[in-house]
Image (cartoon, grey):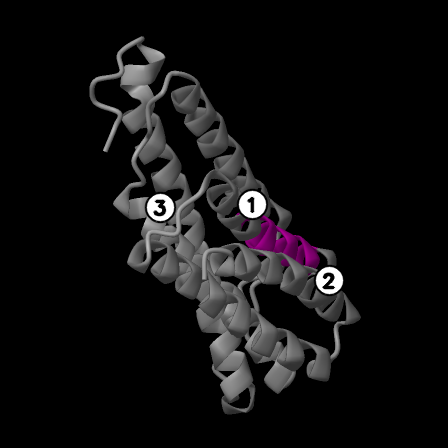
Amino acid sequence: MQHVPNLLSLSRIASTLLIFILVLLNQHWAFFVATVFFVLASITDLLDGYLARRYHLVSSLGVFLDLTADKVFVSSILIALVQIGLVPAWIVVIIVAREFLVTGLRSMAAAQGTVIAAGRWGKQKTFITLLAIGGILLAHGLGDPRLALFPTPVLTLSPVAWSPSSLLHLLADIALVLATFWTIMSGVEYVLRALPLLQGKKDHLSA
């Protein structure tokens, strides 16, 4: 039981490689299979956290693997979606830059023996981002979406275009915009929480 969370994190990293390759194939069946693995990998993330809290299976290695798996999982899939033109690069830059910012602030805090507590914006950001990515994958697994915000907005009132896959893709693009906004706000939230650290104070960081 002790090593289960670590194995779940490793399985998420392995799933990332598979999903990355499937997305680059850019075929309906590949997107559908990628969606299945994406959902399963997302579930392992929830299960990982639950087991760690429920049975107190927290270790330095476990924390490292969990954080690494999460960042590699989301970033790699988004980069693959940029490669095939479904997601604009500027969104991925914002998301990845936020991760570097948070990692840097956490490292500074850890070096001083303190912890910057995760905020509300960050937790919500993760959920919205996963929802958006899953929606994009499933939409292209179901067909050829004719509605999109990216890379060039394609919006029409033609009933023919409003297929389930098109509607899902449009909603997923909207969710991705929301995820980007939440990403920015969570980055601001981390900076505000880290101000005592940046000012040489540590009293208000731990939580």
Q: Earlier in the sequence, mark 1 or mark 2?
A: 1
Which residue is at 50% across, 38% downward? 99
- The image's mark for residue 68 is 1
Q: Position of residue 75 (x, y in %)?
A: 59, 50
Q: Earlier in the sequence, mark 3 or mark 2?
A: 2
Residue 74 visible in the current orientation: yes
Residue density around tag 3, few if under 14, some if 14–19, many if 20 or more, within 10 Å: some
Give the residue at mark 3.
122
Residue 13 is one of the magenta-drawn residues: no
Residue lying at 60% horizontally and 86% vertically, measured from the top left: 142
**Which residue is farthest right?**
25
- Residue nearest the viewer, comparing 153 with 66: 66
Q: Is residue 154 above or below residue 54?
A: below
Which comes sooner in the sequence, label 1 or label 3?
A: 1
Screen quadrant of the N terminus: bottom left
Q: Which residues are magenta?
A: 71-82
On the image, the x and y values in percent for residue 187 come to 39, 36
As drawn, which residue projects farthest toward the bottom? 160
Three-letter code, disc 2: Ile
